[in-house]
Amino acid sequence: MHHSTIAAPSPGRTTPPGAPLAWLLYRIDDNGNEVTMRRFARRADAEAAMRIFEARGHKQAYLVRAERDQAP
């Protein structure tokens, strides 16, 4: 599977505290385990990929979540 890459912000640009660094697509299996599948720079791209996986009819569920900076 091809993994997307996230470009680092330009030196003059900072991400506001609490803003998403990336969007993560997770797979949730029958036992409730969550596995990160891919990272995306844009939420719309992550949600589009989620819809593609959902359309395949697998038993797993899929979820998109924001990846946030853990620094205070």
Image (cartoon, grey):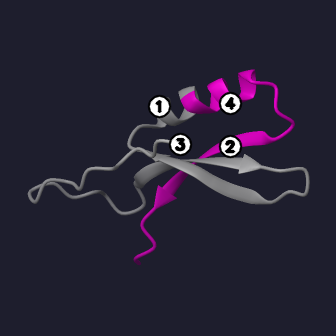
**Counting residues from the N terminus, which is met first, the one under dot 2 or under dot 1?**
1
Query: What number is the disc on residue 33?
Result: none
Q: Nearer the viewer, residue 56 or 25?
A: 56
| Distance between mark 4 and mark 3 Cα atoms | 13 Å
Q: Nearer the viewer, residue 52 or 72?
A: 52
| Distance between mark 3 and mark 2 Cα atoms | 18 Å
Query: What number is the disc on residue 45?
Result: 1
Query: What number is the disc on residue 63?
Result: 2
Q: How many numbered callouts?
A: 4
Amino acid of disc 4 = Phe
| Distance between mark 1 and mark 3 Cα atoms | 16 Å
Residue 46 is left or right of residue 51, and the answer is left
**Counting residues from the N terminus, which is met first, the one under dot 4 or under dot 2?**
4
Residue reaching furthest front? 1
- Disc 3 marks which residue? 1
Q: Nearer the viewer, residue 8 or 53?
A: 53
Amino acid of disc 3 = Met
What secondary structure is marked by label 1?
A: helix
Determine if the magenta segment contains residue 63.
yes
Magenta highlight range: 49-72
Q: Are marks 2 and 1 in contact (CB under 8 Å)?
A: no
| Distance between mark 4 and mark 1 Cα atoms | 13 Å
What secondary structure is marked by label 3?
A: loop
Amino acid of disc 2 = Leu
Tell me: residue 34, above or below residue 45: below
Determine if the magenta segment contains residue 16.
no
